[in-house]
Structure formats: structure tokens, C-alpha cells
Image: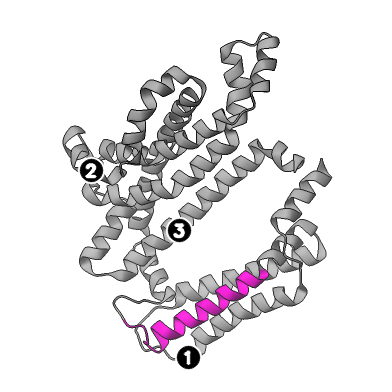
Amino acid sequence: MENSKRVIFNKKYWKEWSSGWNIFSILAVVVALVENLLVASSESVDNGPYRIFLLIFIFYLLFVYLVGYFFSSRVKFYSGHFAQLNISLGILLCVQDLLTEKFGTLALPYFVSFAQILEQMRYDALLLLESTISSLVLWLISFVIGALIGVVLGILLGRYRQFNYWSFPYLKVIGIIPAAAWMPLTMVVFPNSFLAEVFLIVLSVWFPVAFMTIGGVQGILPTYFEAAYTLGFSEHRIIQKIVIPGALPNIFIGIFTSLGLSFTMLVISEMIGAKVGLGWYINWAKSTGNYSQLYGAIVIMALLFSIIFALINKIQEKVLRWRQMAS
């Protein structure tokens, strides 16, 4: 079992480990820090948060390099895989700082340095925290509801021909309509903006999940059902032991597909009636012309999306570990 896990880990982090690439990745971020310290700024910016960020980044890279080199082969594969990417990030940080804050080649208000974004995020920390929590709660409730509806409908449509015959034509028409098109109606039908936002996000989630679940159910080999009938399985047990496990790979594809759509709809829905949230914050920043705030919200959304994507990916690896070991 341990060897199988190691093989899977090595397949995921496939770039060869190199001490040189790791050292260069650390140096690239060091150069970005030195550049920020030594090159005079053409704008009034508090670089404190940005320099702290760079120092944390440097110590993180140094830590994973040393742990991988001396103690852990898993960390070694991990640090080696991302070393070249980290070099590009260090270069990108250096270049964007020079083009914006230092030389003003990309001028305000539309182009701001990462240091300015971090400064603004520190200034608006409480408001951003409140908005992030509000958006995360809204997204989580809506996404879970939408995914569950999609899975249930997908199983029913894929498993039962009569249900598919009567339901799929109508659901297909509803599903292909962009969720944003329902926005005027939701403002009238629902008693408050929160329920309207939940409804819109659910609409953006359920159809991709349902569509992929249908394909997963219909792709299960008939021999599995024949064997189940021979063994005397009830319909409930067939759903539990054959249909759901067989459709799981497709269900996760639908979930990953709807993830990006749900975040897009989250921002759009919060712009119309919310009093707090990242979508509301972006809309407010746009109306005041403060692009540092706008980019700060985008950075937080990118981090949230990456974390949620990684968590769902971990769940998928755990649930479908049999498929990875078989391959």
C-alpha cells in the first residue's frame, strides 16, 4: 500500500528534482526583494506588507528545499516539481514591481503593483474578512445544494428511461439557459437577495453535474446490473453499490466543471443586491475607481478557488484511489 501511494505521488509531481533549480527559485525571490528595497519608487506606497510576503516566500522555499534534501523524499519530489515555476513567479514579481511602482510604465489607476494591492488589503482587512466569510458561506450552501440536485437528477435520468423521456427535454432547455438570464425574475420572485443569490448559483451548478452524472450512469457495463440481479440485489442496493460508484468519476468531472461557473455566478449575483461579499466589494471598488481594492478582491477569490479546488481534488483522490492504484 505504501509503495502504491509513493508511485501515485511520484506521478503527480513528475519533474525531476534538481538542487540547482531549487536554489535558483530562492534566488529569484531574493532578487525581487532586493529590487524592491534598492530601486527608488515613483509612487507613494507602503512596501512593508509586500516585503513581509517576499520574506515568508523565501523562508518557505528554503524550508521545503532543506526538508526535501535532508529528511523527506515526498517533500523533495514536491519542491523539485515546483522549483521552475517558483523561478517564474520570482521573475514576475520583480518585473511587475518595476513596471508599475518603480518606473510607472504601467500607470495608475488601472495598473497597480502587488505591493499596493497588499497595502490596500491590509487597510481593508476587516471588511475583506467579512466579505470573504459572507461569500464563502453563500457559495458553500449554494454549491452543495446544486451538486446534490445534479447528482440525484443525473442518477434518475441515467437509470430510468421513463423519467428520462418525460424530464430530460425540459431540463435540457432550462439547463442551457445561462443562470444570469434568470436574474430579473429572481429579484421579483424571492423575498430577499440572499435566496435569489442561492437560486442563481444553484442554477449554475446543477446542470453540469447532472449532465456528467447521466453519462456516468449510462456508461456502466450492463454485466454489472445482470450480476446484481442474479445476486438478488434490491434497486436501492443497486443504486448504492453499482450506480453511484460507477458514476463517481463523471460526477467529479461535473463538480470541477461547475466550480468555475459557480464562482462566476457568485460575483455576479452579489453585485445586484448584496450588502456585503466579494462581489459587492468588487462592484463598490469599481464604482469608486479604486483598482487596488478590485485587484485585492480578485486575489482573495483566486486563493479561495485554489484552496477549494485542491480540497475537492483531495476528496476525489481519496474516493477514487482504487482507480489510481489500478492504473
Crowding at dot 1, Cα within 10 Å, few <14 / some 14-19 / many 20+, comes out as: few
The residue sitting at 39% across, 46% down in the picture is 262
Do residues under tags 1 and 2 come within 8 Å of each other at their CB atoms? no
Do residues under tags 3 and 2 come within 8 Å of each other at their CB atoms? no
Q: Which mark is residue 183?
A: 2
Vertical order, 39 against 5 (above or below): below
The residue sitting at 31% across, 36% down in the picture is 199
The residue sitting at 43% across, 91% down in the picture is 40
Give the alpha-carbon distance from disc 1 to disc 2, as whole Å: 49 Å
Do residues under tags 1 and 3 come within 8 Å of each other at their CB atoms? no
Residue 311 left/right relative to 110: right
Give coordinates of residue 5: x percent, y percent. Answer: 77, 46
Q: What residue is disc 3 on?
A: 302
Magenta stretch: residue 227 in it?
A: no
Vertical order, 304 against 291 (above or below): above
Give coordinates of residue 177: x percent, y percent. Answer: 30, 41
Sequence-wise, the earlier of marks 1 and 3 is 1
Vertical order, 302 against 223 (above or below): below
The residue sitting at 26% across, 64% down in the picture is 285
Give coordinates of residue 150: x percent, y percent. Answer: 44, 32
Question: Which is in the foreground here, disc 1 or disc 2?
Answer: 2
The secondary structure that most of the magenta stretch takes on is helix
Q: What residue is disc 1 on?
A: 39
- Secondary structure beneath disc 3? helix
Residue 123 seen in render? no
Q: Mark 1: which amino acid?
A: Val
Give the extent of the magenta segment.
Answer: 83-107
Residue 65 left/right relative to 267: right
Sequence-wise, the earlier of marks 3 and 2 is 2
